[in-house]
Amino acid sequence: MSIFRWTFLTLSLFSTALLGQQAPAGQNAVVPGAIRIDPPTLHSIGVRWYVEGDDNGDAVCTLAYRAEGAETWLQGQPLLRVNRETVDRDFDSYGTNSGIYTVGNLLAGSVLFLQPDTDYQIRLQLSDPDGGQGEFTETVRTRAVPYAPPPRRTLHVYPPDFSGARQEPAFATVQSAFDGARPGDLLLLYPGDHAGGVALATSGTATAPITIRGVGQARLVGPADGVNLALDDRAHVFVEELVLSGGRMAIRAQRARYLTVRGCTIEDVKFGLYNDRAESTHWYIADNTITGIDEHWVPRNQDDAAETGINVFGRGHVVEYNRISRFWDCLAIADFGRPPGGIEGIDRHCVAIDFNNNDLARARDDLLETDFGSHNIRVWDNRLFNGHMGCSVQPLYGGPVYFVGNAIYGFIASPFKLHNWPAGILLFNNTSIGSGKAFGSAPLWQNATFRNNLFLGAEDNYSMESGSPDSRTSLDYNGWSRQSNDPGRFIKFTDDGTLTGASQFRFATLADFYAGTGNGEHSIEVDIGVFEQAAYPEAGVSYEPEAVDLQLRDGAGPVDAGVVLANITRQVNGAAPDMGAYERGAPLPHFGPRPRPLETVVEEWVDEAGDAFVLRQNAPNPFNSSTVLAFELAADGGIELVVYNMAGQQQAVLVQGWRRAGAYRVQWDGRDDEGRPLASGAYVVLLQAGGQVQERVLMLVR
């Protein structure tokens, strides 16, 4: 059954449920209802299974997955039971509705760390000890990395002071080129300053997108208090290699769909990219450098402050490998307010958002926000330095939100802001070190699970001062720093939503914490010495990431002290996973914009022959000064040819982008992404295209 047909079928089922065929009041047995497969992203697939009944909330749904053609099913995290939690109790989300918000009755969850453009089978098995069950299997294809195909026509846009020869059709302004654009066009902006404040009036199509690309230092200069580039209501547009400077907002793209912004520099703005409308879908924002107007990130005040580097809302967005700094908030889900209700509203909730491998710094407020997300928000492998708060979740409308493998350093208040009764928070394998408490948040978070995290703070205070009024919340296998000079002042935890009521508890040890709450049985105490190179930060001082090494020392307490988590644990180098963001001995993630293909690589299209996907062995091999790699593509599409060392660390991008079918030869001189000669040794080259992967081992001898 196709995704389209299933979506139509479940819409009908869900309509029936809303029109009165609901479980009787007080029913503990589960009644399966509509299933939503969220828009797949490059590396994730999210699902939602709506149900009736199960008033006691003990229904469970396992998730298994496998690549198409594989025999073995892999276990994912079970779907999170979202059971009509009340959210937004403290304020009214900017006046969008009245009263508190009650989330839906469903189970939701994601598979993470998948390959792009690949078919996966997803199997769900729903059961309830009180009665009721269901099973569902579907094949879902992850999204391909978007690359612009060759243009049907090129429009050449020249700045006023351009003095060289001009190609036709030539345009004197960006707006005049926009006015004449049609699907399949490439608008090529030549080096120099171009007048901004422009709006594109035409959309591209899936097979003929419109591409806006800068050459050299092509610079679009925005109006002082306006929008530099308006893409409202546009679809299938690429913006690449362009400098957008000044103006209040660099790119506004309300309701835009299939927008790609790649390799751009955005500078001197209050907003970088902005959309706060639910109609927006399928953005790909990658490898950009975005810098706001803020000269300082402390003190925390809004006087002349920038706003947000990237604001997204909608479904199916990927924001990865960007460097964002000097804003109030660096990266955020937009302040949309409460999700719309009713049957139409279900498909307008903010779901299936991926924030990964971004480098975020110098935020007056939050380095990263997932506020106003609903379900299947995924945040992994980001580096966050120098901010008032690390990550914000205030509120979250049911969840889950996944925080996995993030490194947070130099925050003042707390690594995670869990305010306004958010529900559905999963924190796995994060490392955080701040100048205040290791963890301090309003004691209002619901339905949360913390595993394999390291929480460290410098202030003479409680390590954790917070709490959860939800018996489903579970904290274990975490590392906590002891901060207070008072031996009895370690953890302050409450389960009634206050820090002053009768349910306020103080614990002197983790053993006391476990005895009093059932949390933390396998947790440990840690200090700053567990890291290779780190010191406790001072409040308001800026730290350079290169001066801090948050990898664990050999033999440190968090090494092998974690627990294996299905689909979350990516590598185990010892008896058990390590706590924290970085498994000892594993390659570190890449943060911020990725290297572009080497200019010294010589690529040649040989002929159209190519009815198979093939990467041939390089020749010569071993090689000294250079070698040739030959490959064949059976279909047009995006490809990547990348060299890695034997530890899995990327060394050189040889080819990246859209290529037509055929046979190719690539000559490589053995240099890395920085142009430095690689050392002698064995390397692996990977060719990826259309969900297929082939590899060869190269031997370099100097």
Image (cartoon, rainbow, N blue to C red):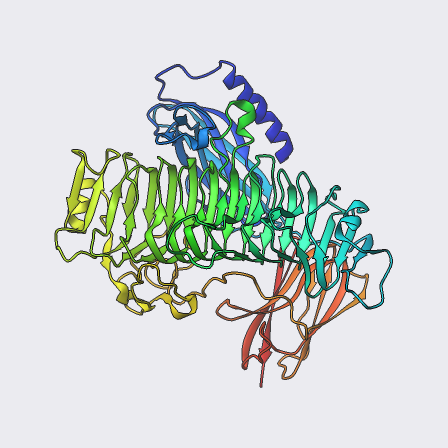
Q: Is residue 490 left or right of residue 658?
A: left
Residues 313 and 194: in front is 194
Instruction: Say left or right for 373 vs 533.
Output: right
- Percent from the top left, x then y, of residue 444? 31, 36
- Note whether 15 is above or below 533 in the view shown: above
Which residue is rendered at x = 50% and y = 66% of the image? 648
Q: Is 137 left or right of 654, judged from the image as shown?
A: left
In the rendered image, residue 18, in percent from the top left (x then y), is placed at: 51, 18
Q: Picture quarter containing residue 128?
A: top left
Q: Nearer the viewer, residue 209 or 169?
A: 169
**Residue shown at 30%/39% (left/top)?**
473
Residue at 29%, 63% (x, y): give it. Answer: 536
From what the image shows, is residue 523 above or below residue 339?
Answer: below
Q: Residue 546: where, in percent of width, then height?
A: 43, 69
Vertical placement of 373 versus 539: above or below?
above
The quarter of the picture where the C terminus appears is bottom right
Count of marks, rendered view: 0
Say which of 459 and 608 sits in front.
459
Quadrant occupied by the N terminus: top right
* Above or below for 368 versus 664: above
In the orientation shown, which residue stands out farthest toward the bottom?
702
Indicate the position of residue 115 as horizontal and vertical percent values.
56, 52
Can residue 410 be seen at all in this image of the molecule? yes
